[in-house]
Amino acid sequence: MRLRADRVALNPIQWVNIKADPSDPDSEDLWLFADPAFRADYPGVLAQVRDAGFAAVMMQLLDTQTLQSYERMVRDAGLVLAPGYASVALPEDHGVLLAPGSAEQVRWYDGIRRIAEESNYFGLSTVFLSPEMSWAPGTRRTLEQTAVGADFDSSRLDRLIDILGAAAEVLREEGVRAGLHNHVGTWIETEEEIERALAAISPSLLGASFDIGHLAWAGIDPVRMLQRHADRLVDVHIKDLDLTVAAASRAEPTSYNAAVDRGLFREPGLGDLDLDAVLAALPDGWDGWVIVEVDRASMEPRASAEVSRAWVEARLTVADPHPA
């Protein structure tokens, strides 16, 4: 399968998931989407995305933005929007007990309702749905031993599946289809956990929106997963990896950030994944979104976007209706 020009987007994460000092891998990790000051920089980032050749960008509103201000910003950049990302937390991870029918239980999904509202406002009918990624003290999957299913607990997984199902139902009620988004460092990172969740929740309620790189990081064959769940595939995130770094992070306890700092993530075509085989595994006639996402750029962000776009352009099935 070739890529459709009207179904390819970039997540501008290259500009927001950075080191405080890019030349020092031991410097502080920054997540600029959470920094109110980033609002002033956001229009310039989107302009660079457009200048790199992308016509679409993944929906990502800042907490300090209204729907209308974000709409103006995206429009001014000459971009259209692709589906966004939603996450839902396991209440017990926050010391919360949700009584059935309580106000607290209803409000637990307010963030999901916000994503549904955003998606509907911008005419997007799908969303990536993932468990929360926690950095709380003692969370081994992020802080000590990532990508191997550390601290697996079957009953906890069942509770999380219930929470995911409820979040997917909230989205469905608002006309938005959720796809399960696997992510290393969450309580759904291994093949067993992904399969358990997909088997327990009806395909009519929850599809599959895989992250190709995070599948491979956890030692899962992305091609096999795409083929196995072709009938419920919604959208995908695509990235490349240094598989030597990925294997080393599984071979001995390694934190999420340590693996990233060792150069795990690569722009499409610059790593070890057979991404052409991944594209070939997408179902015939599939019209989901392919969102290029380089969780940590291996070069300056603008160059990373340009390299990613060059990879995309070599695989387009039709000419881009919005050439750079």
Image (cartoon, rainbow, N blue to C red):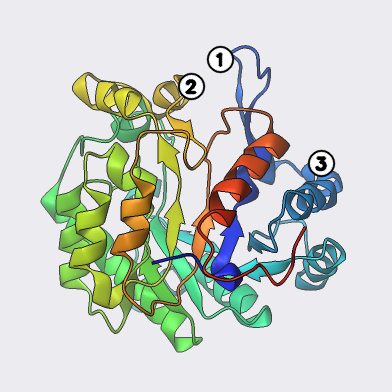
- Disc 3 + disc 2, Cβ < 8 Å: no
- Mark 3, mark 2: which one is toward the viewer? 2
Q: Is residue 22 left or right of residue 289?
A: right
**In the rendered image, is residue 79 in sight?**
yes
Report the amino acid beneath label 2.
Answer: Asp
- The residue to which callout 2 is attached is 261
Give the CA separation, mark 1 to mark 2.
Answer: 6 Å
* Quadrant position of the C terminus in the picture: bottom right
State how far apart marks 3 and 2 are (Cα): 25 Å
Measured as percent of width and height from the top left, residue 208 is found at: 32, 67
> Would you call the spot at circle 3 few (<14 residues within 10 Å), some (14-19), or many (20 or more)?
few
* Residue 99 is at least partly visible in this image: no
Residue on which disc 1 sits: 25
- Closer mark to the observer between disc 3 and disc 1: 1
Pointer 3: what residue?
37
The mark nearer the N terminus, 3 or 2, is 3
Q: Percent x, y for residue 142?
A: 37, 32
Q: For the image shown, how many numbered marks are present on the structure?
A: 3
Specify the quadrant that holds the N terminus. bottom left
